[in-house]
Amino acid sequence: MAEGSTKTIMANLNNFLSRIQTDYAFYLQFQNSPEEALTPYELSSEERSALIEVGLQLWNRLKQFMPCPNLPDRGSEADVSSAQSSGSNWSISPLSTATTHYVLPDGSADLGLGPEALLARPEIQQTISKIRRSSAQSDRLASVLALMEHIG
Amino acid sequence: MSKTEETEESLPFDIAIVGLGIIGVHQITREADETIRRCRHTFVVDSGYGVISYLQSICGEVTSLFPFYEKGKSRLPTYRKMASEVINAAISDSPVCFATYGHPLVYCYPAILIQRAAKLLDLRVETFPGISSLDTLFVDLGIDAATDGLQMYETTDLLLRRRPIQNDVPCVLWQVTAIAESTYRTDRFSAEQFLPLQNYLLKFYPAEHQVTLVLSKTFPLLKSIVETYRLGTLASDLERGPQTGNLYIPPVRRRAIEDQQLLEKLALQA
């Protein structure tokens, strides 16, 4: 497929997916008659079937559009079919974990780090004074970050 | 009303913290939507398809905080940077909004930092709930969390503190596939890394007990992924699985009624 044509198809898929998010009536139309809702969109046959079959392929298709710089590479189609047939050996690492985390609690509740206790600490008082004195947003950011390091 | 005009309204806070739900725009509550429309600047952590472009259509300035994540780097400095950006903007030009996927006070440390710092700097904060992955888990499994109660733990925390599990109460383990991992990573975990969890759970449940991994859909057209595993082979099943989501462990039995007097009273009312 020519590069220009591929770009057009990608743009079409993009438009379709955006509309699903923002036009609820269209979303319902697609749920009721997917073929008809897809008619105006120029899509590759793989994309069309991923959208209509709503299986693992769609998870993988969507990954390429997500605005996350550190997403893993898209899995191969072979991996996808394997996952679909066996229910295992996933090639995807879906996106919902992108911001999951474990932060070891600092024990602030036990240490009584409420606002009053924090404000009593000289280093915090100094940092707050610096923040209040800064008039430029860029100068202030470093002091705000220093405050964050003191409090959590 | 234009986006600029909307920000002229007086809001009772300097910083709004809002949750955006799990599947994107469809789960942004009316309350969150109206709040974002009225903020001068929205800082967002959400990788959902189309979410940022939607926010850009309702708020004058939108900044994604996602680029702050760095593969292999500890998340804590990242969260501090995110919170600092929000606080700094609120000092200059409030009201601003911190919008995150899911619920803003469910495993979202930047929101906690923003709240703490705001108190010290006399900034007013209002927090608006969002649909969390716990909410969507109930829907995906079709269960009512109130029937037998619910216990929930973050998986690393469970292992770290050896928290006791009550096996007659349903249990949800959060972030079951990010055990002992404080950095931002996207590569896969091995069965060996899940083995401590399997072994710990086997202290409370039989090996044949079935547990369910739930990855709720993150886009309206997707189907949630629900996979059932045997506890005895949990580590290898998690290695092969989608490597994300929460684990639901049903109770092994229903606890017997002990207060017969209360039971009789209830029977009389029936």
Image: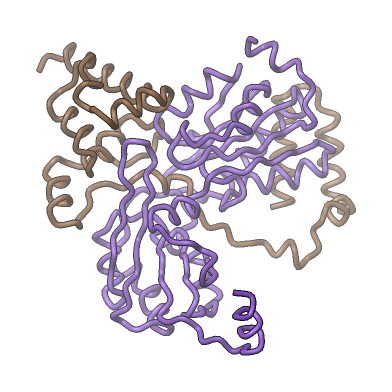
Chain colours: A brown, B purple
Asked whether B144 or B155 is in front, the reply is B144
Residue B17 found in image quarter = top right
Asked whether B270 or A2 is in front, the reply is B270
Give the quadrant of the C terminus of chain B.
Answer: bottom right
Say left or right for B53 vs B261.
left
Asked whether B65 or B137 is in front, the reply is B137
> How far from the left and from the top, in percent, is residue B263?
61, 84
Residue at image point 67% right, 11% down: B4
Asked if A17 appears above or below A152 in the picture, the reply is: above
Residue at image point 43% right, 24% down: A22
Asked whether A53 or B71 is in front, the reply is A53
Say left or right for B129 vs A17.
right
> How far from the left and from the top, in percent, is residue B180?
46, 64
Residue at image point 86% right, 53% down: A121
Say left or right for B42 vs B69.
right
Residue B179 found in image quarter = bottom left
Asked if B35 appears above or below A104 in the picture, the reply is: above
> How far from the left and from the top, in percent, is residue A35?
19, 25
> How far from the left and from the top, in percent, is residue A92?
27, 46
Give the quadrant of the N terminus of chain B.
Answer: top right
Residue at image point 66% right, 28% down: B35
Asked if A53 appears above or below B51 in the picture, the reply is: below
Asked if A134 appears above or below B268 in the picture, the reply is: above
Say left or right for B182 vs A57.
right
Count of picture labels: 0
